[in-house]
């Protein structure tokens, strides 16, 4: 009887402990879901001003949305970029998404490399060209893990710059030279197309020569030093980014030439040049594109497919002309990358009624 009583007590105690453990298990919060992780293959240099600012907004978006972002810099070397891609594929811990840019037309090679991977791919800033897609297919076709793309309105940017620049010539007549970026870059090709559209609308403006300054100030300086002397009647300079504009400006100053320039980007230097009216035409807005992509990927991971809100391949109308006052406001805020730009405002996960993505820099200009 004594043994039986002890056994009963033991059973009772074990039952109480089991109940306590169950209660503790029920009351304990569930293990937090791992955050959405993104690796961005940056084609540019580590210290390249445009990409530094661009990536800063991607980090801001990641912070706003509770995501993880890792950036691997290609240093303008397609071989190094592909080496980074292979490292991502072979890594023990793999990201949710790999974001790539089709610079040097590496897109198809990246798609083939990750064809059997569970990592989802997203093309940012420049996607596969129509010719490439005719061969390998579009997003969500042959390569099912390539879920989409987001690119800016580069053709419109080239057009806006050229049209505004031509408007400064008497009766739209005169001579112009142009400096494009890297020849094998979709962004450069599209901006050139915009330039030619504007020229077709103004047949009295003659494009004397177009050179490939490779996005580099030094390269454009060297080209302009040799070029400008050939064309004494040139009065307008169209350039596909700000670095090349500054290279041409330096060469022109050394030759005593007074020219009108267009520029594209959002560096402090180019904004100040627009404020000082050393640059007559400035186009910008695309520097938050990477942050917009983070929003789309965040929503996709939350079960809200961005294809239902604008399509699987989207063009963001971010580029716009900046006047002097807008340049002043943007310069004042450029150091505060998240000033008045909480990326949650663009997310369908945080705004259930959102029908389409409308990322823009308007909040930074107010």
Image (cartoon, rainbow, N blue to C red):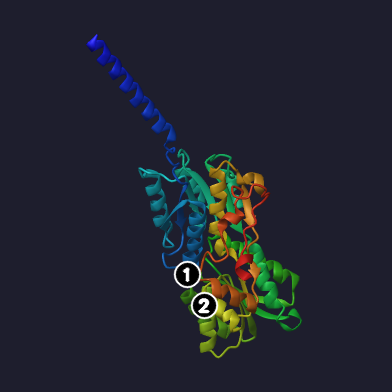
Looking at the picture, how far across and down is residue 310, in whole percent?
66, 49
65 left or right of 361 in image:
left
Check the image and report above or below for 121 versus 16.
Answer: below
Q: Position of residue 258 (x, y in %)?
A: 60, 88
Looking at the image, do the residues carrying marks 1 and 2 touch, with CB atoms under 8 Å apart?
yes
Q: Residues within 10 Å of mark 1 (few under 14, many from 20)?
A: some
Q: Which mark is residue 49?
A: 1
Asked if 99 appears above or below 208 in the picture, the reply is: above
Question: How far from the left and from the top, in percent, is residue 44?
Answer: 46, 63
**Between discs 1 and 2, the one toward the N terminus:** 1
User: SS class of the residue under badge 2?
Assistant: helix
User: Which of 100 and 271 lies nearest the eye of the viewer?
Assistant: 271
What's the residue at 55%, 43% (across, down)? 302
Given residues 121 and 169, the one toward you in this image is: 121
Residue 251 numbered tag: none
Q: CA distance from mark 1 to mark 2?
A: 10 Å
Residue 287, visible in the rendered structure: yes
Task: For mark 1, give the secondary structure.
Answer: helix
The residue positioned farthest toward the bottom in the image shown = 256
**Which quadrant holds the C terminus?**
bottom right
Nearer to us in this view, 36 or 130: 36
For image coordinates 40% across by 28% down, the residue present is: 22
Hey, which quadrant is residue 9 in on the image?
top left
Q: Residue at the far front: name it.
A: 2
- Badge number at residue 269: 2
Q: Is residue 64 above or below residue 188?
A: above
């Amino acid at each position: 009887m004594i043994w039986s009583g002890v056994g009963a007590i033991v059973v009772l105690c074990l039952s109480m402990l089991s109940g306590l453990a169950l209660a503790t298990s029920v009351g304990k919060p569930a293990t937090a879901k791992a955050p959405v992780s993104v690796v961005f293959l940056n084609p540019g240099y580590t210290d390249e001003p445009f990409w530094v600012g661009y990536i800063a907004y991607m980090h801001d978006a990641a912070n706003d949305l509770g995501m993880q972002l890792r950036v691997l810099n290609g240093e303008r070397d397609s071989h190094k970029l592909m080496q980074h891609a292979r490292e991502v594929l072979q890594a023990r811990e793999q990201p949710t998404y790999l974001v790539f840019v089709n610079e040097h037309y590496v897109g198809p090679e990246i798609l083939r490399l990750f064809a059997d991977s569970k990592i989802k791919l997203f093309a940012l800033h420049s996607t596969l060209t129509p010719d490439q897609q005719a061969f390998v297919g579009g997003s969500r076709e042959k390569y099912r893990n390539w879920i989409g793309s987001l690119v800016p309105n580069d053709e419109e940017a080239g057009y806006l710059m050229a049209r505004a620049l031509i408007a400064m010539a008497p009766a739209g007549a005169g001579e112009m030279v142009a400096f494009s970026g890297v020849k094998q870059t979709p962004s450069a090709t599209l901006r050139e197309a915009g330039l030619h559209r504007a020229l077709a609308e103004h047949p009295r403006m003659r494009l004397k020569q177009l050179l490939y300054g490779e996005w580099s100030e030094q390269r454009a300086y060297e080209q302009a030093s040799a070029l400008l002397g050939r064309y004494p009647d040139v009065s307008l300079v169209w350039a596909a980014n700000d670095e090349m504009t500054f290279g041409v400006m330096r060469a022109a100053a050394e030759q005593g030439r007074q020219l009108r320039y267009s520029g594209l980007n959002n560096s402090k230097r180019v904004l100040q040049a627009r404020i000082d009216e050393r640059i007559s035409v400035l186009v910008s807005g695309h520097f938050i594109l990477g942050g917009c992509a983070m929003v789309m990927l965040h929503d996709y991971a939350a079960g809200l497919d961005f294809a239902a809100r604008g399509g699987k391949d989207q063009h963001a109308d971010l580029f716009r002309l900046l006047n002097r006052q807008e340049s002043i406001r943007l310069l004042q805020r450029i150091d505060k990358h998240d000033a008045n730009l909480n990326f949650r405002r663009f997310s369908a996960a945080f705004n259930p009624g959102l029908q389409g993505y409308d990322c823009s820099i308007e909040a930074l200009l107010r």
